Amino acid sequence: MEYLQHAQERFKQQTGSAGTDPRRFTEDTRRPGPPIVYSATKTITLSDHVMREQRLITGFDEGPFVDAYRVLRAQVLQQYRQKGWNVIGVSSPSDQEGKTLTAVNLSLSLAMDLAHTVLLVDADMHRPGVHRVFGMEPDPGLTEYLFDNAPLAQLLIHPGIGRFVYLPGGRAIRNSAEALASPRMTGLVQELKHRYPSRLIVFDLPPLLSRADAVGFAPHIDALLLVVEEGRTQAAEVERAMDVLKGSVPILGGILNKSGRAMLTLRQGRKLVTTDR
């Protein structure tokens, strides 16, 4: 795993040397917001079977899998609060490394902090996949908002889980990089970012090395979380991904997927969370 050590050192250089003690974080102790009734937003109901089958953390009460995302949430919220951030992107060097499931579970974990609402945006417009994680068929979403002027309120979906909604990717398109860089997309990000002060936003972005989308979109996000998969992601891919991102956006940390380890690995100054997907 020498390549992962190199990647960790790159994370250290970009994120600083302060470590995070997961024992310092439990549920948010600040006064929670009032209950939300989603009257205008489309609401669906996910069964426990679907949530477990799709490996959503809301389908499990306890265990290392759930604990991993709790610690990840603690790290993300610490950065949000210290630096005034509220927009994070999730990507990976290449396809099929678990970035979409990570983005969904991170969003669900953040939504368990009752001081916030959470919006997940499927911004992988070339190959949208968030709907599959929820066991759903494709719905109109970001593409229809950008190209068909569909009202945003009619596109958002509340999957019956806490203070969480998501914006589907909509129909797949080829010119996704241009769409994400369009003035209408810029306006949408600003609207989402500033309309609700307590809202945290997660963008599921395309892989870094296969398309230019994520790099072009980087100025719109506060930080990026990089997902790699043990046994699949190659050393050269990690290095290339870090080079592609260099100077464009802070790297919040990395997720080691399918590590086969039950516990998290947290090293001072090396923000790496391991999960067994």
Image (cartoon, grey):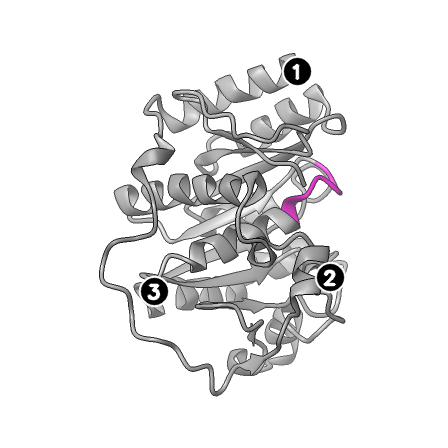
User: Can residue 134 be seen in the rendering of this structure?
Assistant: no
Determine the residue located farthest toward the bottom in the rendered image.
Answer: 39
Mark 3 or mark 2: which comes first in sequence? Answer: 2
**Quadrant of the rendered image containing residue 257:** top right
Q: Secondary structure at mark 2?
A: helix
What amino acid does circle 3 point to? Answer: His
What amino acid does circle 1 point to? Answer: Met
Q: Position of residue 171 (x, y in %)?
A: 74, 69
For the residues labelled 1 and 2, the Cα–Cα distance comes to: 31 Å
Q: Secondary structure at mark 1?
A: loop
Q: Is residue 225 above or below residue 132?
A: above
Judging by the rendered image, the residue that carries numbered circle 2 is 132
Going 46% across and 25% down the picture, which residue do you hit?
266
Mark 1 or mark 3: which comes first in sequence? Answer: 1
Mark 1 or mark 2: which comes first in sequence? Answer: 1
Q: Using a 10 Å C-alpha cutoff, classify the residue at mark 1 as few (fewer than 14 neighbours), some (14 to 19) or many (20 or more).
A: few
Judging by the rendered image, the residue that carries numbered circle 3 is 194
Is 98 part of what is drawn in magenta?
A: yes
Going 44% across and 60% down the picture, which residue do you hit?
111
Asked whether the beta carbons under mark 3 and mark 2 sit within 8 Å of each other, the answer is no
Q: Nearer the viewer, residue 128 or 64?
A: 64
For the residues labelled 1 and 3, the Cα–Cα distance comes to: 41 Å
Judging by the rendered image, the residue that carries numbered circle 1 is 1
Mark nearest the camera among 1 and 3 is 1
Over which residues does the magenta segment extend?
94-100
